[in-house]
Image: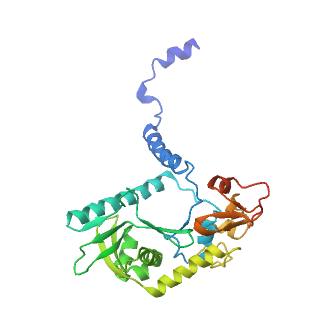
Amino acid sequence: MERVARLSLFIKESDMPSIPDTSGLELIDKIYEGYVREDNNDKLYLGRLGSSSIGNECIRETWFSWRAFDREEFEGRVLRLFGTGHWQEDRVVEDLRRAGFSVWEKRDDGKQYECVDDTGHFITKLDGIIKGVPRRDGAHILEIKTHNKASYNALYKHGVQKSKPVHYAQIQITMKLQGLSSCVYLAVCKDDEKMYCEIIEADQVEQDKILKRIKSLTEATMRPAGISDDANSFGCKFCTYKEVCVRTKEPLRNCRTCVMAQPTVDGQWLCNLNNHTLSFDDQRAACEEYEAL
Protein backbone atom coordinates (compact mmCIF):
# COMPACT_ATOMS: atom_id res chain seq x y z
CA MET A 1 0.00 0.00 0.00
CA GLU A 2 2.86 2.36 0.91
CA ARG A 3 4.57 1.68 -2.46
CA VAL A 4 1.31 2.40 -4.35
CA ALA A 5 0.94 5.65 -2.46
CA ARG A 6 4.50 6.69 -3.37
CA LEU A 7 3.99 5.79 -7.06
CA SER A 8 0.83 7.88 -7.22
CA LEU A 9 2.91 10.97 -6.47
CA PHE A 10 4.58 10.62 -9.88
CA ILE A 11 1.33 10.36 -11.87
CA LYS A 12 0.35 13.68 -13.41
CA GLU A 13 -3.29 14.77 -13.17
CA SER A 14 -3.32 15.18 -16.97
CA ASP A 15 -2.42 11.49 -17.37
CA MET A 16 -5.47 10.33 -15.40
CA PRO A 17 -8.58 9.23 -17.35
CA SER A 18 -11.05 12.12 -17.65
CA ILE A 19 -14.48 11.75 -16.06
CA PRO A 20 -17.25 13.61 -17.92
CA ASP A 21 -18.86 16.36 -15.86
CA THR A 22 -22.54 15.46 -15.71
CA SER A 23 -23.58 18.41 -13.57
CA GLY A 24 -25.19 20.21 -16.50
CA LEU A 25 -27.19 17.16 -17.55
CA GLU A 26 -28.34 16.61 -13.99
CA LEU A 27 -29.45 20.24 -13.77
CA ILE A 28 -31.54 19.88 -16.93
CA ASP A 29 -33.02 16.62 -15.65
CA LYS A 30 -34.09 18.40 -12.46
CA ILE A 31 -35.85 21.07 -14.51
CA TYR A 32 -37.76 18.47 -16.51
CA GLU A 33 -38.58 16.48 -13.37
CA GLY A 34 -40.22 19.59 -11.95
CA TYR A 35 -42.61 19.74 -14.91
CA VAL A 36 -43.52 16.06 -14.51
CA ARG A 37 -44.05 16.46 -10.77
CA GLU A 38 -46.35 19.42 -11.31
CA ASP A 39 -48.29 17.67 -14.06
CA ASN A 40 -48.85 14.59 -11.91
CA ASN A 41 -49.82 16.58 -8.84
CA ASP A 42 -53.28 14.99 -8.64
CA LYS A 43 -54.40 16.85 -11.75
CA LEU A 44 -56.33 13.78 -12.77
CA TYR A 45 -57.71 12.91 -16.14
CA LEU A 46 -61.32 12.80 -14.92
CA GLY A 47 -62.52 15.92 -16.69
CA ARG A 48 -65.19 16.84 -19.21
CA LEU A 49 -65.21 16.06 -22.89
CA GLY A 50 -63.07 18.76 -24.48
CA SER A 51 -63.34 20.62 -27.76
CA SER A 52 -59.68 19.99 -28.60
CA SER A 53 -60.42 16.28 -29.16
CA ILE A 54 -64.05 16.30 -30.28
CA GLY A 55 -62.97 16.38 -33.93
CA ASN A 56 -60.69 13.34 -33.67
CA GLU A 57 -61.08 10.88 -36.51
CA CYS A 58 -61.70 8.04 -34.04
CA ILE A 59 -64.73 8.56 -31.80
CA ARG A 60 -63.63 5.61 -29.62
CA GLU A 61 -60.37 7.40 -28.81
CA THR A 62 -62.33 10.45 -27.64
CA TRP A 63 -64.62 8.24 -25.55
CA PHE A 64 -61.66 6.41 -23.99
CA SER A 65 -60.11 9.74 -23.04
CA TRP A 66 -63.29 11.06 -21.42
CA ARG A 67 -63.99 7.80 -19.61
CA ALA A 68 -60.35 7.70 -18.41
CA PHE A 69 -59.41 4.26 -19.78
CA ASP A 70 -55.76 5.24 -19.72
CA ARG A 71 -53.63 8.28 -19.12
CA GLU A 72 -50.99 9.67 -21.41
CA GLU A 73 -47.77 10.41 -19.57
CA PHE A 74 -45.60 13.19 -20.98
CA GLU A 75 -41.90 13.66 -20.34
CA GLY A 76 -40.75 16.96 -18.90
CA ARG A 77 -39.39 18.29 -22.18
CA VAL A 78 -42.79 17.89 -23.85
CA LEU A 79 -44.60 19.48 -20.92
CA ARG A 80 -42.26 22.45 -21.18
CA LEU A 81 -43.07 22.64 -24.89
CA PHE A 82 -46.77 22.85 -24.00
CA GLY A 83 -45.90 25.74 -21.70
CA THR A 84 -44.15 27.50 -24.57
CA GLY A 85 -47.39 27.25 -26.56
CA HIS A 86 -49.32 28.93 -23.73
CA TRP A 87 -46.67 31.65 -23.54
CA GLN A 88 -47.05 32.26 -27.28
CA GLU A 89 -50.80 32.74 -26.81
CA ASP A 90 -50.18 35.50 -24.27
CA ARG A 91 -47.63 37.05 -26.59
CA VAL A 92 -50.03 37.09 -29.56
CA VAL A 93 -52.71 38.75 -27.43
CA GLU A 94 -50.23 41.50 -26.58
CA ASP A 95 -49.29 41.77 -30.29
CA LEU A 96 -52.95 42.31 -31.17
CA ARG A 97 -53.44 44.95 -28.50
CA ARG A 98 -50.28 46.73 -29.60
CA ALA A 99 -51.72 46.79 -33.12
CA GLY A 100 -54.88 48.50 -31.85
CA PHE A 101 -57.35 45.59 -31.62
CA SER A 102 -59.60 45.05 -28.62
CA VAL A 103 -59.01 41.62 -27.07
CA TRP A 104 -60.53 39.99 -24.01
CA GLU A 105 -58.77 36.77 -23.04
CA LYS A 106 -60.27 36.49 -19.56
CA ARG A 107 -63.64 37.07 -17.93
CA ASP A 108 -64.23 39.74 -15.29
CA ASP A 109 -63.41 37.18 -12.59
CA GLY A 110 -59.98 36.57 -14.13
CA LYS A 111 -60.81 33.11 -15.47
CA GLN A 112 -60.57 31.93 -19.06
CA TYR A 113 -63.72 32.15 -21.17
CA GLU A 114 -65.42 28.78 -21.40
CA CYS A 115 -68.72 27.32 -22.58
CA VAL A 116 -70.46 24.15 -21.39
CA ASP A 117 -73.13 22.29 -23.36
CA ASP A 118 -76.61 21.36 -22.07
CA THR A 119 -75.43 18.02 -20.66
CA GLY A 120 -72.70 19.64 -18.57
CA HIS A 121 -70.24 17.01 -19.81
CA PHE A 122 -68.73 18.94 -22.72
CA ILE A 123 -66.59 22.06 -22.35
CA THR A 124 -64.81 24.35 -24.73
CA LYS A 125 -62.41 27.13 -23.77
CA LEU A 126 -61.63 30.28 -25.71
CA ASP A 127 -58.27 31.93 -26.21
CA GLY A 128 -60.19 35.18 -26.34
CA ILE A 129 -62.73 37.44 -28.01
CA ILE A 130 -61.57 40.10 -30.47
CA LYS A 131 -63.10 43.24 -31.96
CA GLY A 132 -61.86 45.70 -34.58
CA VAL A 133 -60.93 43.18 -37.27
CA PRO A 134 -60.44 44.95 -40.63
CA ARG A 135 -63.63 45.06 -42.72
CA ARG A 136 -65.44 42.94 -40.11
CA ASP A 137 -68.07 44.15 -37.67
CA GLY A 138 -68.73 42.93 -34.15
CA ALA A 139 -67.01 40.36 -31.97
CA HIS A 140 -65.22 37.21 -33.07
CA ILE A 141 -63.83 34.13 -31.36
CA LEU A 142 -60.03 34.28 -31.14
CA GLU A 143 -58.15 31.01 -31.58
CA ILE A 144 -54.34 30.97 -31.36
CA LYS A 145 -52.25 27.97 -32.40
CA THR A 146 -48.53 27.28 -32.74
CA HIS A 147 -47.18 25.01 -35.49
CA ASN A 148 -43.90 23.49 -36.54
CA LYS A 149 -42.63 24.31 -40.01
CA ALA A 150 -44.24 21.36 -41.82
CA SER A 151 -47.59 21.89 -40.13
CA TYR A 152 -47.50 25.62 -40.82
CA ASN A 153 -46.71 25.09 -44.50
CA ALA A 154 -49.64 22.70 -44.88
CA LEU A 155 -51.91 25.19 -43.13
CA TYR A 156 -50.71 28.03 -45.36
CA LYS A 157 -51.29 25.95 -48.48
CA HIS A 158 -54.63 24.29 -47.66
CA GLY A 159 -56.30 26.34 -44.92
CA VAL A 160 -57.70 25.25 -41.56
CA GLN A 161 -60.62 23.04 -42.62
CA LYS A 162 -58.55 20.81 -44.88
CA SER A 163 -55.18 20.75 -43.11
CA LYS A 164 -56.41 20.91 -39.48
CA PRO A 165 -59.89 19.33 -39.29
CA VAL A 166 -59.58 18.86 -35.50
CA HIS A 167 -58.97 22.59 -35.08
CA TYR A 168 -61.87 23.32 -37.44
CA ALA A 169 -64.24 21.20 -35.35
CA GLN A 170 -63.04 22.87 -32.16
CA ILE A 171 -63.67 26.32 -33.61
CA GLN A 172 -67.13 25.44 -34.92
CA ILE A 173 -68.46 24.04 -31.64
CA THR A 174 -66.95 26.98 -29.76
CA MET A 175 -68.76 29.44 -32.02
CA LYS A 176 -72.00 27.49 -31.57
CA LEU A 177 -71.87 27.46 -27.78
CA GLN A 178 -70.55 31.02 -27.47
CA GLY A 179 -73.19 32.37 -29.86
CA LEU A 180 -70.77 34.05 -32.28
CA SER A 181 -70.66 33.51 -36.02
CA SER A 182 -67.00 33.94 -36.92
CA CYS A 183 -63.52 33.18 -35.62
CA VAL A 184 -60.11 34.76 -36.08
CA TYR A 185 -57.66 31.85 -36.34
CA LEU A 186 -54.10 33.05 -35.79
CA ALA A 187 -51.22 30.63 -36.26
CA VAL A 188 -47.55 31.14 -35.40
CA CYS A 189 -44.72 29.09 -36.88
CA LYS A 190 -42.38 28.11 -34.05
CA ASP A 191 -39.40 27.84 -36.42
CA ASP A 192 -39.36 31.34 -37.91
CA GLU A 193 -42.17 33.37 -36.25
CA LYS A 194 -44.18 33.66 -39.47
CA MET A 195 -47.89 34.22 -38.86
CA TYR A 196 -50.99 33.05 -40.68
CA CYS A 197 -54.51 34.39 -40.14
CA GLU A 198 -57.80 33.02 -41.41
CA ILE A 199 -61.33 34.25 -40.73
CA ILE A 200 -63.57 31.21 -40.30
CA GLU A 201 -67.33 31.54 -40.62
CA ALA A 202 -69.93 29.44 -38.81
CA ASP A 203 -70.63 26.13 -40.54
CA GLN A 204 -74.06 24.90 -39.46
CA VAL A 205 -73.58 21.45 -40.98
CA GLU A 206 -70.32 20.92 -39.08
CA GLN A 207 -71.81 22.29 -35.87
CA ASP A 208 -74.80 19.93 -36.04
CA LYS A 209 -72.45 17.04 -36.74
CA ILE A 210 -70.40 17.82 -33.62
CA LEU A 211 -73.49 18.20 -31.44
CA LYS A 212 -74.64 14.75 -32.58
CA ARG A 213 -71.20 13.35 -31.79
CA ILE A 214 -71.30 14.81 -28.27
CA LYS A 215 -74.75 13.29 -27.73
CA SER A 216 -73.55 9.93 -29.02
CA LEU A 217 -70.51 9.96 -26.74
CA THR A 218 -72.35 10.95 -23.58
CA GLU A 219 -75.12 8.40 -24.15
CA ALA A 220 -72.86 5.48 -25.11
CA THR A 221 -73.05 2.61 -22.60
CA MET A 222 -70.44 0.51 -24.39
CA ARG A 223 -67.36 1.14 -26.50
CA PRO A 224 -68.21 3.06 -29.70
CA ALA A 225 -66.87 1.80 -33.01
CA GLY A 226 -63.25 2.74 -33.67
CA ILE A 227 -61.46 3.37 -36.95
CA SER A 228 -59.76 -0.04 -36.73
CA ASP A 229 -59.36 -3.11 -34.52
CA ASP A 230 -55.73 -3.47 -35.57
CA ALA A 231 -53.43 -1.75 -33.07
CA ASN A 232 -50.68 -1.60 -35.70
CA SER A 233 -52.76 0.17 -38.33
CA PHE A 234 -51.63 3.65 -39.35
CA GLY A 235 -54.33 5.49 -37.42
CA CYS A 236 -53.86 3.42 -34.27
CA LYS A 237 -50.18 2.65 -33.74
CA PHE A 238 -49.45 5.96 -31.99
CA CYS A 239 -52.72 6.09 -30.02
CA THR A 240 -52.49 6.27 -26.22
CA TYR A 241 -55.39 3.83 -25.91
CA LYS A 242 -54.41 1.18 -28.45
CA GLU A 243 -53.67 -1.48 -25.81
CA VAL A 244 -56.92 -1.05 -23.90
CA CYS A 245 -58.70 -0.78 -27.23
CA VAL A 246 -57.61 -4.28 -28.35
CA ARG A 247 -57.90 -5.55 -24.74
CA THR A 248 -54.23 -6.41 -24.22
CA LYS A 249 -54.24 -4.05 -21.25
CA GLU A 250 -56.82 -3.48 -18.53
CA PRO A 251 -58.36 0.00 -18.33
CA LEU A 252 -57.42 2.19 -15.39
CA ARG A 253 -59.52 1.33 -12.36
CA ASN A 254 -61.92 4.21 -11.72
CA CYS A 255 -65.68 4.65 -11.78
CA ARG A 256 -65.79 5.91 -15.34
CA THR A 257 -64.43 2.63 -16.68
CA CYS A 258 -67.00 0.67 -14.66
CA VAL A 259 -70.20 -0.74 -16.17
CA MET A 260 -72.20 0.76 -13.28
CA ALA A 261 -71.27 4.40 -13.97
CA GLN A 262 -73.61 6.63 -15.94
CA PRO A 263 -73.24 10.31 -16.90
CA THR A 264 -76.26 12.37 -15.82
CA VAL A 265 -77.38 15.99 -15.98
CA ASP A 266 -75.22 18.96 -15.02
CA GLY A 267 -72.00 17.06 -15.65
CA GLN A 268 -72.64 14.61 -12.81
CA TRP A 269 -71.98 10.87 -12.67
CA LEU A 270 -74.28 8.28 -11.13
CA CYS A 271 -73.51 4.80 -9.80
CA ASN A 272 -76.39 2.55 -10.85
CA LEU A 273 -75.42 -0.02 -8.23
CA ASN A 274 -76.62 2.12 -5.32
CA ASN A 275 -78.15 5.14 -7.09
CA HIS A 276 -75.38 7.32 -5.68
CA THR A 277 -74.01 10.52 -7.23
CA LEU A 278 -70.26 10.08 -7.59
CA SER A 279 -67.92 12.78 -6.34
CA PHE A 280 -64.53 13.33 -7.93
CA ASP A 281 -62.89 11.31 -5.15
CA ASP A 282 -65.45 8.52 -5.59
CA GLN A 283 -64.72 8.32 -9.31
CA ARG A 284 -61.00 8.19 -8.78
CA ALA A 285 -61.09 5.47 -6.14
CA ALA A 286 -63.75 3.08 -7.51
CA CYS A 287 -65.35 0.55 -5.14
CA GLU A 288 -65.06 -3.17 -4.44
CA GLU A 289 -67.94 -3.88 -6.85
CA TYR A 290 -65.99 -2.40 -9.78
CA GLU A 291 -66.52 -4.18 -13.10
CA ALA A 292 -64.62 -2.96 -16.15
CA LEU A 293 -66.45 -1.94 -19.30
In this rendering, position of residue 231 left or right of residue 190: right
Number of marks in the rendered image: 0
Seen in the picture, residue 200 relative to 246 is either above or below; the reply is below
Residue 108 rendering spot, x and y as whole percentages: 35, 59
Q: Residue furthest bottom?
A: 205
In screen coordinates, is 64 left or right of 197?
A: right
Q: Is residue 151 above or below residue 107?
A: below
Q: Which quadrant of the figure has residue 190?
A: bottom left
Q: Could you say which is closer to the camera, residue 283 or residue 10? A: 283
How far across and down, in percent of the image, does residue 113 sit? 40, 64
Q: Quadrant of the C terminus?
A: bottom right
* The N terminus - image quarter: top right
Q: Which quadrant of the view contains residue 129?
A: bottom left
Q: Which residue is drawn at the image coordinates 32% and 78% (left, top)?
A: 198
Give 222 or 245, whichever is nearer the viewer. Answer: 222
Question: In the picture shown, does residue 94 fall above or below 149?
Answer: above
Q: Please indicate whether residue 274 sits to the left or right of residue 245 in the image.
A: right
Residue 112 position in % (x across, y down): 40, 61
Question: What residue occupies the far top of the structure in this picture?
Answer: 2
Taking the image as drawn, is residue 192 in sight? no
Residue at 67% over, 54% down:
282
Residue located 66% across and 57% down the image = 283
The answer to whether residue 220 shows anywhere in this view is yes
How is colour applied across the structure in the image? Answer: rainbow
Q: Is residue 216 above or below residue 148?
A: below
Image coordinates of residue 80 in percent, x first then y, are 44, 53
